[in-house]
Image: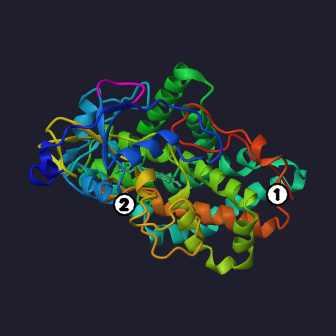
């Protein structure tokens, strides 16, 4: 209407929609999110926990804008009770996800060298070795096997411990804690105990490495603490999410393999042109509904106008990277999986200074996993009908609970 064009910020705020955490099967796009996209460009949502409502941006353009704009703060969210998916959350000092600039840069600096393309190149042979051992074990016992249990779950745990510099003698303990923290079945108390165990252990290892010249993350953090660049508590808060972050690879790769195992044309493309798998990985990263609802909010530090709406100072805003990745303005035929899509500027790893710290590491692991499994197991296929694959429930990150295969 003319009202909207002449006085864009005078628009009625959209209704607040409830976004329940529904358990979705398979790789279905969340129908609630699809509805919010249709209502958009900016809507308002209420998630299962926390208080009040928050804005939701679903268009690619707005998602990029918001995630690049320092007027939206993460540190403010940590202070409040913003509507959210998780029942509880306890931001720690040092955690990158909750830091605004200039703190974010200061915290990230000590560890950034450990996650670069160069560092990942050096890691590659060792990661391949770890993976080969896991696949050897599975092949030795013979089909059928659960790919999640045998390969997709342990591999990222082992690789991340390599990058972090977890000593061999402590690995089992560290992996036990990690498994309990991310497990859905152990309950909140077990997860809290494991968190205390892991964070206590991290504190000790950071202290023990104060004089280490190593290139592992714990040595890098210890050095930064010794030089006074970050506090010890911050080092621990920084390390925790990195040590646990491998979980994302397990489930994302689970979805990726499920798609290949249930879409013959996709599998055929991967097998026919093994040297040209790169763009397919990107297309799958774009398409895969990685998470349930949305991640962490941001809070407007001042009034900001977007798409004819005024987001007032103090109001919370979520962006949906999943929705942005299906924006037809940027990705023609957004719901199709087009292996040769070009360009493919997806935001599966986020955008702006909160861009995933582990993106290059994750990408390396996805490539190694898919390449190794496809190349070593030419007859790889599901051991059950696709509809019998069980999916994770009540979870932040979506993926198959098990992936029974034969070869
Ligand atoms: C943040 C995706 C694997 C560590 C993020 C964000 C996304 C993402 C979307 C949020 C960006 C934002 O807040 O705006 C993924 C995907 C993965 C993956 C799809 C696997 C396929 C990993 C791994 C690690 C990791 C393996 C660690 C070793 C982190 C950390 C952050 C983050 C520390 C917070 C960064 C910050 O706020 O500055 N990731 N991730 N991620 N990820 Fe990942």
Visible in this render: residue 109? Answer: no
Rendered location of residue 113, percent (x, y): 39, 64
Position of residue 1 in the picture relative to residue 180 (left or right): left
- Which residue is at the front of the view, 280 or 45? 45
Q: Which residue is mark 2?
A: 112
Q: Residue furthest left?
A: 6
- In percent of the image, x 36 and y 50: which residue is there? 58
Find out whether residue 85 is within the magenta segment.
no
- In percent of the image, x 83 and y 68: which residue is there? 378
Disc 2 residue lies near ligand 1 with CB under 8 A: no
Find out whether residue 50 is within the magenta segment.
yes
Disc 1 residue lies near ligand 1 with CB under 8 A: no
Category of crowding for the residue at label 2, using alpha-carbon neighbours closer than 10 angstroms: few (below 14), some (14–19), many (at least 20): some
- Which residue is at the front of the view, 94 or 39? 39
- In percent of the image, x 57 and y 43: which residue is there? 398
Where disc 1 sits, the SS reads: strand
Q: Which residue is mark 1?
A: 381
Rendered location of residue 37, percent (x, y): 40, 48
Category of crowding for the residue at label 1, using alpha-carbon neighbours closer than 10 angstroms: few (below 14), some (14–19), many (at least 20): some
261 in relation to 38, above or below: below
Magenta span of residues:
47-52
Mark 1 vs mark 2, CA separation in Å: 38 Å
Q: How many callouts does the rendering have? A: 2
Q: Residue furthest front?
A: 1
Task: Specify which label sits upstream in the sequence, 1 or 2.
Answer: 2
Tell me the chief SS of the magenta region. Answer: loop
- Which residue is at the front of the view, 367 or 381? 381
Position of residue 73 in the picture relative to residue 323 (left or right): left
Position of residue 29 in the picture relative to residue 345 (left or right): right
Rendered location of residue 203, percent (x, y): 41, 37
Where disc 2 sits, the SS reads: helix
Image depth: mark 1 or mark 2 in front: 1
């Amino acid at each position: 209407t003319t009202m909207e064009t002449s006085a864009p910020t005078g628009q009625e705020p959209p209704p607040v929609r409830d976004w329940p955490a529904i358990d979705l099967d398979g790789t279905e796009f969340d129908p609630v999110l699809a509805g919010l996209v249709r209502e958009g460009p900016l809507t308002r949502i209420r998630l299962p926990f926390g208080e009040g409502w928050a804005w939701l941006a679903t268009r690619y353009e707005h998602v990029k804008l918001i995630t690049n704009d320092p007027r939206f703060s993460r540190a403010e969210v940590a202070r409040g009770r913003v509507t959210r998916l998780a029942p509880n959350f306890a931001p720690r000092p040092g955690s990158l996800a909750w830091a605004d600039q200039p703190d974010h840069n200061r915290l990230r600096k000590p560890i950034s060298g450990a996650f670069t393309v160069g560092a990942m190149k050096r890691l590659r042979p060792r990661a391949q070795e770890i993976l080969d051992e896991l696949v050897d074990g599975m092949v030795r016992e013979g089909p059928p096997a659960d790919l999640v249990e045998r390969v997709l779950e342990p591999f990222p745990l082992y690789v991340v411990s390599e990058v972090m510099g977890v000593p061999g003698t402590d690995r089992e303990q560290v992996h036990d804690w990690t498994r309990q923290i991310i497990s859905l079945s152990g309950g909140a108390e077990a997860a809290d105990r494991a968190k205390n165990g892991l964070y206590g252990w991290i504190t000790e290892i950071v202290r023990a490495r104060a004089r280490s010249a190593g290139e592992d993350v714990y040595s890098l953090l210890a050095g930064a603490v010794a030089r006074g660049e970050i506090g010890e508590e911050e080092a621990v808060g920084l390390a925790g999410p990195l040590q646990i972050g491998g979980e994302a690879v397990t489930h994302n790769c689970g979805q990726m393999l499920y798609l290949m195992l249930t879409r013959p044309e996709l599998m055929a493309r991967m097998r026919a042109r093994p040297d040209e798998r790169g763009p397919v990985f990107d297309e799958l990263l774009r398409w895969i509904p990685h998470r349930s609802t949305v991640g962490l909010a941001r809070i407007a530090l001042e009034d900001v106008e977007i798409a004819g709406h005024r987001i007032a100072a103090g109001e919370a805003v979520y962006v949906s990277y999943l929705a942005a990745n299906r924006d037809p303005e940027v990705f023609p035929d957004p719901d199709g999986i087009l292996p040769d899509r070009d360009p493919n500027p997806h935001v599966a790893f986020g955008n702006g200074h909160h861009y995933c710290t582990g993106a290059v590491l994750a990408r390396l692991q996805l490539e190694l996993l898919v390449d190794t499994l496809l190349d070593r197991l030419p007859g790889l296929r599901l051991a059950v009908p696709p509809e019998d694959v069980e999916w994770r429930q009540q979870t932040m990150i979506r993926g198959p609970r098990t992936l029974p295969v034969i070869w």
